[in-house]
Image: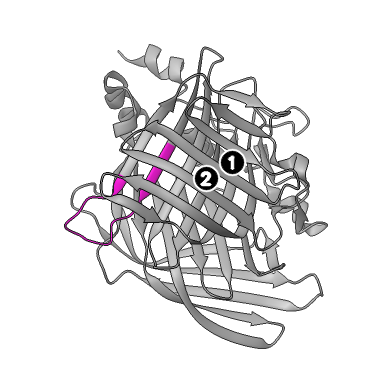
């Protein structure tokens, strides 16, 4: 009955096999990572169905977690949209999180596609490519005025940070690209009905270009972002659906002020313990180990590990279908075989870094997510 809808929105996919997935990991044999040039910061604006977003994950000096993201989406070159999302996690379990997702009207990509601007929202990079500013008065209930400055080099894994989809890598049918600022200083405020919230602290920035339908690219995601006085660590891992043989693709980094200690495609996220969420039927993680390993630029063996045991209740559980038009929700759920959810946590944890035999353990704040799509 709903076959027309499944085809229209791209809900079904044939079996391609692992050979049709050209992971960024293959690039790392010669080039573990590449430091970004300013031109790598441009918006790509793919002329096809895509989602492109620039997201800042914030850990304030007071321990508060927040994120701000600018999103561009293109559906079949028919519907193109700009959007800003702001989330500030509540420290008080009795109070809801600040969460706003608003469409941005009259937006433009200017300055040779370095900047996103509109009358009420802007996302701009500095002349030297080391600072971003984000300002928004789109929603009077949540205004944004933030500045992010690099503390460690920006990078992409491999030569171009991209995993390609399709049998012919020279003519890919889709791609997934990530570039990062692993460690940045943030200053400024987010203003809500409760007043000014000082966002001074550290941040991680990621630019994602997803030129493939989300449920075609990944069945599950694991994400981790850690900040401490000395270290920043990130891990972005996705597991493809059966159409690409459940292949794991990961990118990760450990950095400190002025230096990338390690960056490659070797990071892992292991769900050590999980329980069935009675509301969703999904295996909600209760303990996850994040690990990084490889060689530093100096040729030293480097490992890092975070063992996260979620003793406290999760920060949030997001029903992704809430963002989908109502008439399509049942169709999409049926096609995917499950209702997709994102689980989020923000515990204090320790990172253990072994940098060529120099071992250091340090406490910091972890912002992590587990996403189940299909």
What's the distance in space between the residues labelled 1 and 2, CA to CA? 8 Å
Taking depth in this image into account, of 188 and 73 the one nearest to the observer is 188
Give residue 208's mark.
Answer: 1
* First to last magenta residue range: 85-98
Q: Quadrant of the C terminus?
A: top left
| Residue at 45% across, 67% down | 61
Residue picked out by circle 2: 55
Up/down of 59 relative to 41, above or below: below
Q: Where in the figure is residue 6, as x and y percent of width and height?
A: 40, 19
Q: Quadrant of residue 62?
A: bottom left
Q: What secondary structure do most residues of the magenta stretch adopt?
A: loop
- From this viewpoint, is residue 374 visible? no
Q: In screen coordinates, is 264 left or right of 120? A: right
Q: Quadrant of the N terminus?
A: top left
| Residue at 61% across, 46% down | 132
Do the residues under discs 1 and 2 have CB atoms within 8 angstroms? yes
Q: Where in the figure is residue 90, as x and y percent of width and height?
A: 28, 56
**Which mark's residue is nearer the viewer, 1 or 2?**
2
- From this viewpoint, is residue 87 visible? yes
Disc 2 element: strand
Q: In screen coordinates, is 242 left or right of 183? A: left
């Amino acid at each position: 009955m709903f076959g027309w809808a499944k085809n229209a929105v791209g809900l079904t996919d044939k079996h391609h096999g692992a050979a049709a997935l050209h992971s960024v990991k293959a690039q790392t044999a010669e080039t573990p990572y590449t430091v970004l040039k300013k031109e790598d910061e441009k918006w790509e604006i793919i002329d096809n169905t895509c989602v492109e977003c620039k997201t800042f994950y914030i850990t304030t000096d007071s321990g508060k977690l927040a994120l701000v993201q600018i999103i561009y989406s293109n559906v079949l070159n028919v519907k193109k949209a700009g959007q800003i999302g702001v989330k500030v996690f509540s420290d008080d379990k009795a109070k809801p999180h600040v969460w706003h997702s608003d469409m941005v009207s009259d937006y433009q990509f200017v300055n040779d596609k370095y900047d996103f601007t509109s009358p009420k929202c802007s996302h701009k990079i500095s002349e030297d490519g080391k600072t971003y500013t984000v300002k928004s008065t789109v929603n009077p209930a949540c205004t944004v005025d933030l500045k992010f400055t690099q503390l460690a080099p920006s990078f992409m894994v491999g030569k171009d940070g991209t995993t390609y989809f399709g049998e012919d890598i020279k003519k890919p049918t889709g791609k997934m690209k990530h570039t990062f600022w692993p460690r940045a200083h943030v200053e400024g405020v987010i203003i809500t009905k409760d007043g000014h919230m000082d966002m001074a602290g550290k941040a991680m920035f990621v630019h994602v270009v997803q030129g493939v339908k989300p449920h075609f690219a990944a069945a599950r995601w694991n994400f981790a972002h850690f900040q401490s006085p000395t270290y920043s660590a990130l891990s972005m891992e996705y597991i493809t659906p059966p159409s690409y043989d459940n292949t794991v693709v990961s990118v990760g980094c450990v950095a400190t002020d002025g230096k990338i200690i390690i960056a490659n495609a070797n990071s892992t996220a292991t769900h050590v313990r999980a329980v069935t969420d009675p509301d969703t039927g999904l295996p909600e993680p209760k303990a996850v180990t994040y690990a990084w390993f490889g060689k530093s630029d100096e040729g030293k063996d480097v490992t890092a590990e975070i063992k996260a045991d979620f003793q406290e209740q999760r920060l949030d559980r997001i029903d992704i279908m809430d963002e989908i038009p109502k008439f399509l929700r049942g169709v999409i759920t049926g096609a995917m075989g499950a209702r997709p959810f994102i689980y989020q946590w923000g515990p204090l944890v320790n990172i253990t870094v072994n940098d060529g035999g120099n071992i250091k353990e340090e406490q910091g704040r972890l912002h992590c997510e587990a996403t189940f799509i299909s």
